[in-house]
């Protein structure tokens, strides 16, 4: 398990897998497909929450790097969190959490995604955000990346 806070770089495995897949015969797979094809899961991400963290408040969010790409984590309750791929499915913008609207919004072209399901509320994106399991307390949250 990696210990990543805020936007620290936890990548490395992804680049390795991409290079390995390319060398192994030009396989064309998505990053999650590579993990599945190799029978491995991605490394979990653990985030410590101190008083300066946006996650110290309900409605706060952070974007963290993981071996599966950027993930947006939002705090929705005292010990309730949600986590989705932060990469917009339209053209890769990094989505932002809108707590009042209970949605993720892409600043590039305005796509909106439901914060409960990751599904598209408003295009131009037409594919949902991938979800990840997030479990935590007031002091930390762990994202199971898969
Ligand atoms: S990249 Fe997100 S709406 Fe276009």
Image (cartoon, rainbow, N blue to C red):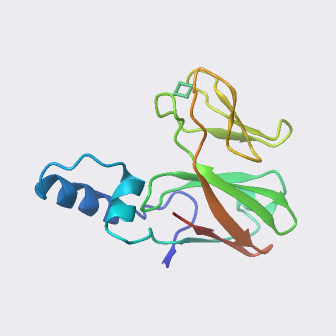
Rendered view: 74 above or below 86:
below
- Please give left or right for residue 141 compared with residue 51 in the image: left
Q: Quadrant of residue 19?
A: bottom left
Image quadrant, ligand 1: top right
Give coordinates of residue 79: x percent, y percent.
83, 69
Rendered view: 143 above or below 31:
below
Q: Residue at x 49, y 79 (%)?
A: 1
Q: Does the rendering let one see residue 112? A: yes
The foreground one among 12 and 57 is: 12
Q: Does the rendering let one see residue 12? A: no
Residue that lies at the very extreme toward the bottom in this rendered image: 1
- Please give left or right for residue 26 compared with residue 97 in the image: left
Q: Residue at x 75, y 44 (%)?
A: 115
The foreground one among 146 and 73 is: 146
- Please give left or right for residue 54 compared with residue 8 in the image: right
Rendered view: 114 above or below 73:
above
Q: Residue at x 48, y 57 (%)?
A: 65
Q: Residue at x 48, y 61 (%)?
A: 8
Give coordinates of residue 146: x percent, y percent.
51, 63
The foreground one among 127 and 99 is: 127
Query: How many labels, in total?
Result: 0
- Please give left or right for residue 13 compared with residue 63 in the image: left
Give coordinates of residue 101: x percent, y percent.
83, 35
Rendered view: 140 above or below 128:
below
Give coordinates of residue 10: x percent, y percent.
43, 64
């Amino acid at each position: 398990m990696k210990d990543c806070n805020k936007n620290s770089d936890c990548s490395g495995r992804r680049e390795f897998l991409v290079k390995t897949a390319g060398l192994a015969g030009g396989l064309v797979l998505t990053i999650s497909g590579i993990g599945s094809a190799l029978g491995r899961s991605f490394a979990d991400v653990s985030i410590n929450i101190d008083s300066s963290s946006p996650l110290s408040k309900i409605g706060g969010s952070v974007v963290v790097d993981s071996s599966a790409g950027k993930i947006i984590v939002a705090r929705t309750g005292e010990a309730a969190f949600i986590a989705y791929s932060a990469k917009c499915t339209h053209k890769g913008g990094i989505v932002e959490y809108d707590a009042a609207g209970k949605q993720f919004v892409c600043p590039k072209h305005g796509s909106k995604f439901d914060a409960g399901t990751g599904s598209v509320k408003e295009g131009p994106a037409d594919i949902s955000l991938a979800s990840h399991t997030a479990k935590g307390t007031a002091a930390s949250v762990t994202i199971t990346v898969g």
